[in-house]
Image (cartoon, helix red, strand yellow):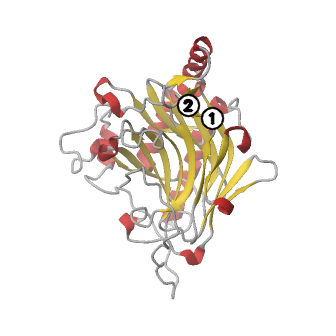
Amino acid sequence: MAAKAALLLAAAAWVCLSAAAASAFADVPTVSFGERFSPLFGDGNLVRSSDDRSVRLLLDRRSGSGFISSDYYLHGFFSASIKLPKDYTAGVVVAFYLSNGDVYEKTHDELDFEFLGSRWGGQWRVQTNVYGNGSTSHGREERYLLPFDPTLEAHRYSVLWAPTHIIFYIDDTPIREVIRHPEMGGDFPAKPMAVYATIWDGSTWATEGGKYKVNYKYAPFASDFSDLAAVGPRADPVLRVPRSAAGDADQDLLGLMTADYAVMTPQKRAAMRAFRARQMTYTVCYDAVRYASGPFPECDNSDEERENFSAWGESKTVVMRPRARGRRRGRKAGAGARVRSNVASS
């Protein structure tokens, strides 16, 4: 009963936090799949809706699947409503992210939402990553529990990438802000990136460090993407300049920087603090084992967050449902599953 009450309180608090910021996103334009995106891999495992406003990505023994934006962007606001696979999803990874790894193999930039599956149905976790100039060896990861069941209905996940700061949103509530600090140098993403969405087999690391693998008895695993949005100046990924005229590009950047989703008001920052206090399970800012030399320069050293964080690993306890009798552990992932090779996740 206590666990159920805590879940209800978290859900109620989440509704209040999201409602407070909802107006900031009312005017964000969404696009059809064909307007801005194209299939990346997976063939028949990528299924477009009849009206082309949503896409289903499938993972089975044969392959995962994914799509990519038709253009690269030099900054912008990128968003999708995502419904995650249900039931047993250990080892499954669903990702919505920006990257230029296909152009800059060893010095790529990346901004991620990575959703990590679970043995217990709706108890997914989400990881955000910030990589600049190939900095995956000292990546800026954070992980959070979700305050809702992401398999019951779609929730909106967004990234604001500006020259001065980055904001990750869930359902219009900011969950992470990275302000560009001079000492970050090339670790702050600064080269044009494309938008990606994928589902793949992350058995080696995704669930409890790889302890639990994908069990294809529960396949196909399906994740639905809708309300796709990509707002920002399109750019040449090699020349690193906007494709539009200089005046138009400046206007696009000005519009991005002054949009509601790019401005962190006191109310939005308070909502972010509340989310992180309840839901965050890991941040590089207080990982004294992995980063003994101290926190990253952009970390704000919140005493409240530090108190909630253990020196290494997950600091929050997840109450699991009793395991059904006779259920066997999943088999090792088949060779046909595809994994993104350009991301070093931990």
- Does residue 241 sit above or below 226 in this rendering? above
Residue kind at label 2, given as amino acid type: Tyr
Residue kind at label 1, given as amino acid type: Ala
In the image, farthest residue toward the right: 50
**Residue, disc 1:** 230
228 on left or right of 305: right
Task: Tell me the number on the disc at residue 294.
Answer: none
Say which of 10 and 68 sits in front: 68
In the image, farthest residue toward the bottom: 326
Q: Are marks 2 and 1 in contact (CB under 8 Å)?
A: yes
Instruction: Tell me the SS state at disc 1.
Output: strand
- Does residue 289 sit above or below 242 in this rendering? below
Q: Dividing the picture into quarters, in which one does residue 20 lie?
A: top right
Say which of 234 and 297 sits in front: 234
Say which of 204 and 170 sits in front: 204
- Give x and y (percent) for residue 339: 48, 59
**Residue, disc 2:** 73
Of the two numbered discs 2 and 1 in the rendering, the one whose residue sits closer to the viewer: 2
Q: Of the two numbered discs 2 and 1 on the same chain, state the one appearing first in sequence.
A: 2
Question: Which residue is located at x 65 percent, y 62 percent?
Answer: 45
Tell me if mark 2 has few (under 14), some (14-19) or many (20+) residues whose alpha carbon lies within 10 angstroms of its own: many
- Does residue 116 sit above or below 157 in this rendering? below
In the image, farthest residue toward the top: 247
